[in-house]
Amino acid sequence: MVSKGRLEAFSDGVFAIVITLLAFDLKRPSPGPGMSLASALWDQWPAYIAYFVGFLQIGVMWLNHHRLFQQVREVDGVLLVLNLNLLLWVALVPFATGVVAEFLADGGQDAATAMVLFSAVLVANAISFVALFAWITHDERITGTLPPRAVVRAARIRFGIGIGAYAGALVLSFFVPVAALTVHAVMALYYTFDQATV
Amino acid sequence: MVSKGRLEAFSDGVFAIVITLLAFDLKRPSPGPGMSLASALWDQWPAYIAYFVGFLQIGVMWLNHHRLFQQVREVDGVLLVLNLNLLLWVALVPFATGVVAEFLADGGQDAATAMVLFSAVLVANAISFVALFAWITHDERITGTLPPRAVVRAARIRFGIGIGAYAGALVLSFFVPVAALTVHAVMALYYTFDQATV
Amino acid sequence: MVSKGRLEAFSDGVFAIVITLLAFDLKRPSPGPGMSLASALWDQWPAYIAYFVGFLQIGVMWLNHHRLFQQVREVDGVLLVLNLNLLLWVALVPFATGVVAEFLADGGQDAATAMVLFSAVLVANAISFVALFAWITHDERITGTLPPRAVVRAARIRFGIGIGAYAGALVLSFFVPVAALTVHAVMALYYTFDQATV
Amino acid sequence: MVSKGRLEAFSDGVFAIVITLLAFDLKRPSPGPGMSLASALWDQWPAYIAYFVGFLQIGVMWLNHHRLFQQVREVDGVLLVLNLNLLLWVALVPFATGVVAEFLADGGQDAATAMVLFSAVLVANAISFVALFAWITHDERITGTLPPRAVVRAARIRFGIGIGAYAGALVLSFFVPVAALTVHAVMALYYTFDQATV
């Protein structure tokens, strides 16, 4: 009953706002007495990396969302709810990014907690996307004609590897938070350049 | 004189921004001395529930708004004003959610005040939506052909029950704020899964 | 060279964000020791009135913008710049609203300053809109066929009265700030209900 | 594989949000004891100039983006990534504007640092736009038919001069920050009025 066009427009709106709010979450530094603005800006390096990673993650998610919906012909109720669930987790990325930006440089337990939160939100994003993908490709009502089985199976394997990598980063977050952020950055760059070759 | 398409696009924009700002309202915790980030995050539990409830409420409202406008063929001035009135209350949901997030855990009178505010904003949302619905279905100028009377009557009864439930949660907010939030969460989940079966 | 559709979509985006940010500017109250949340919320009354006035002003501006652009057939460079100028002032409304929300209740000189800022931003909005209107209706290149002269003249008189009323509220802001806010509220309500009868 | 329409809509969303957030970054002044709101507002003059410059820069960038995409017929992967890269830098403009707004009036080294950040973000914007432009006009797959060579060469020279001017402002920022902001304001005004004559 809901038209695909308006569902896409609504989702695009959320993606565009989330990706912009990431940057809005960069705080203006407040250098303490005797501290220069330059070094206060420099001390915010985890915020810049977190912004970069979050931006690429949301950007790639938007691209995947767009490609997935190109196959959709009929929107049903389950699809609506699964899409809303995905947006719920997408919208949490700036919050998680902000926590990393503030607590990563402190090191210690709080840095680990921040990275666990960040990784967990990305895992939830990945799972929500795969759930949407699985529903859309599970029978022919939604897509009209299903893509060939081999294609669907290949995509599922690819997404499975992706979730595995995110889960690995989640485990790593508990022990070596900076390494986990590095893994996220590498994955985001990989996915982005992967898009450039499609 | 205003085209339905641009009215929908404007409303979609407001819905998308409001649903995203809900998450932006999650504050980065500031753990006090000797307090870990993990427990500071944990202490924010009312914020997460409020985010979850607010997100589902706005999401369901967007779906209902979309379905309602699929029947609209002519936009008149009263419809414009009633739609603007609805958006005015929709845009207040993040503010109310933020107040709940900050004051619910304190307990006592302030927790009740926060929940009363939250419930009152949702009641105003429901009333505004029903006013829009009533105007759109009140004669044939707007919809071209009215849906069958029985369908309209059933929808009105359903909305009446909804307003009643919100009003009940409002009353409950004065006395047992946490229970009122639970009622809102259950209602939001019910409406969401109800969408999945349409 | 710029298509009307994309110009409208961009402007709609700005209007939707501005109208939503107005509500986001409502601050969560921080009741002092021994002060209840209820009275802290109550003390924010100028913020609620400012939100209400700002919301209606932006809503009505969006409607007028939409109606004006329905006449546009060709977008030229001057129109682009005048539209950008209008959006520049529209985007300042939440800032002005926030200043009123914070300083009106204090009374005295600061309340006057806040209302002068608010009124001045609305005057600039009105002038920017009239400039856009005047350009669009000044010859036939943009609209294809101009509306009848009498209609254009009537609209110009109406806008002239509007600017005069805003200018009056601006002068009043220096002396009786609360009265100026009341004038703005009445004008916003008048314009809104005026839309309902078109 | 990604449709041009949805890519434009997503980009427009980001531009509209960024241009609106610029104004949202204007802080409500907090006049100290014995200080009037009027003088506190007055002391924020760098914030107003930064808003004005940032607004025009984003507005002109949006116009150029729109014109460039009117030539696009096929969206490929590299274009997607280059467009995402442009949006990444566009979204940083409000952060840079905010830092200028807060630190320019202090003078000294911090004012220089703030202006260097601002100029560097604008240089990165300009380079990202030129990269997108170069890719789109580098062969006929994307545009269908390339514009005449002389037109492309003229545009490249024009963009080269633009990047040179931004780089000059960047160098100036180290030594005379206020002069650098003036250069940016003049350039933004020049580009804006240049649009009015197209």
Image (cartoon, coloured by chain):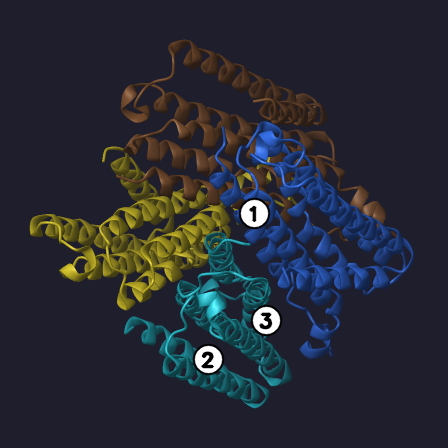
Chain colours: A yellow, B cyan, C blue, D brown
Residue closer to the observer: A62 or B67 = B67
Question: Circle 1 sits on which residue?
Answer: C14
Cα–Cα gap, marks 3 and 2: 15 Å
Q: Is residue D164 above or below residue A191?
A: above
Residue C84: quadrant of the picture: top right
Mark 1 Cα-neighbour bin, 10 Å: few <14, some 14–19, many ≥20: many
Question: Circle 2 sits on which residue?
Answer: B184
Left or right position of C54 against A23: right
Cα–Cα gap, marks 1 and 2: 32 Å
| Residue A140 disc label | none
Cα–Cα gap, marks 1 and 3: 27 Å
The reply to whether dot 1 and dot 3 touch (C-beta < 8 Å) is no
Mark 2 Cα-neighbour bin, 10 Å: few <14, some 14–19, many ≥20: many
Q: Secondary structure at mark 2?
A: helix
Residue depth check, mark 3 versus mark 2: number of the one nearer the observer: 2
Left or right position of D47 against A196: right
Residue under the image location 37 percent in, 48 percent down: A58
Residue D154 pos. (x, y %) = 47, 12
Q: Chain of mark 1?
A: C
Residue A23 appears in view? yes
Residue depth check, mark 1 versus mark 2: number of the one nearer the observer: 1
| Residue B99 disc label | 3
Residue depth check, mark 1 versus mark 3: number of the one nearer the observer: 1
> Callout 2, which amino acid?
His
Q: Chain of mark 2?
A: B
